Amino acid sequence: MIQKIKSAYKKHPSFFYWLFFGTGFIIDNLTFRRVDLLFENIVIFSYLGIAGLSIILMNAYHKGELKSHPMKKLRNFLPLPMQYAFGGLFSGFVIFYARSSSIVASWPFLLILILLFIGNDLLKNRYARLTFQISIYYIAIFSFAIFYVPVVTKTIGAGTFIASGFVSLVVIRILIWIIRKINKSHIEKSRRMITLSIGSIYILFNVFYFTNIIPPIPLALKETGIFHKIERSAGNSYIANGEKPPFYQPFELTSRTFAQSGHETAYFWSAVFAPTDLKTNIFHKWMMFNEEDGVWTTIDKIGYEIIGGRNNGYRGWTLKRNIEPGKWRVDVVTERDQLLGRTTFKVIETEIKQELQQVTL
């Protein structure tokens, strides 16, 4: 049986790589729900363990440690679990980071993750190179630490990100130490390139974070809407009145047109997910488009505290009284002005009283 699989693998290696690649992506889409749940983190830790162990075994074989061992028969298959693990990791990261991002602000970082995910098969020949193995593993470790450290510490911000970077450096240093114990000459030959690669990745991640390109994970914007009125109802729910969205916007809570008769008050609603017990502030940045200058002008920036744990996000709203006709948008941002999401809408004057739908939030 093993001989048949080995023969098929030699004839059709790309099929096996894409099989493992696709399997990892499907499993992640079915299982990854929240960044703070135990099962999701066990899966990610398992992927990291599989990838790390594969790197260690491949370098042990390179030294000759396994050539007289029964595991030598599995040497040709070692890249498969490594690619499966990296495929699973980066598909999971694409899922989690995409949920926490606005494409407008975070597309460069998301593009890197997507390319690493899709290009997993194209890069298979490079997995035999130690520098490449460690570089990809370090990207995975850092990407995971960015949202796992906030889950553990119940904090978010620049200090937490710096701590995430420190954790990632410690983990990769331990892996390099293990490989050095097994195959010192291999590490020494690649030492300069490994140091340069890890240093470059570390600097790039920091540049992305402090320029607000990395999404504000583990926060995630779940929903938004622009309403004519919001009030608390009995229990733990809210009643809101807003214009029904058109049929071609089935996932919107309200229409992107706010029709007012007289100077009404506009209510902007958002629900933001945060891990359990994590407390932080978010802001609604009300902006109006200046037709003469062709730029967006900030009119108000109103914030409130959110407390994590609710699966559908912490709910809250801000309001704008006597809103003027024109083109508006509200950015949902963090304390560091990281963009969670953006809603654009148009305010128009009308003498016809609008028929509003009532929704429970």
Image (cartoon, rainbow, N blue to C red):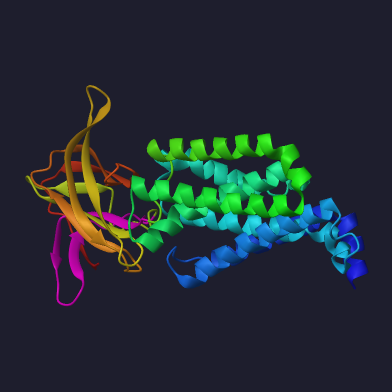
Say left or right for 37 vs 88. Answer: left
Name the image quarter holding the N terminus.
bottom right
Q: Nearer the viewer, residue 193 or 253?
A: 193
Say left or right for 151 vs 18. Answer: left
Residue 222 part of the magenta-drawn span: yes
Q: Position of residue 77 (x, y in %)?
A: 81, 60
Where on the picture, by quarter, is residue 15? bottom right
Residue placed furthest toward the top: 293
Magenta stretch in the rendered image: 219-247
Residue in the picture at 63% in, 44% down? 135
Say left or right for 256 vs 174. Answer: left
Q: Position of residue 8 (x, y in %)?
A: 89, 61
Residue in the picture at 73% in, 40% down? 188
Name the image quarter holding the C terminus.
bottom left
Q: Nearer the viewer, residue 103 or 178?
A: 178
Residue 339 part of the magenta-drawn span: no
Residue in the picture at 44% in, 55% down? 147
Q: How many marks?
A: 0
The image shows residue 94, relative to residue 135, as above or below, that is: below
Q: Position of residue 344 (x, y in %)?
A: 29, 43
The image shows residue 115, relative to residue 40, as above or below, that is: above
Q: Position of residue 224 (x, y in %)?
A: 29, 55
Q: Nearer the viewer, residue 52 or 350?
A: 52
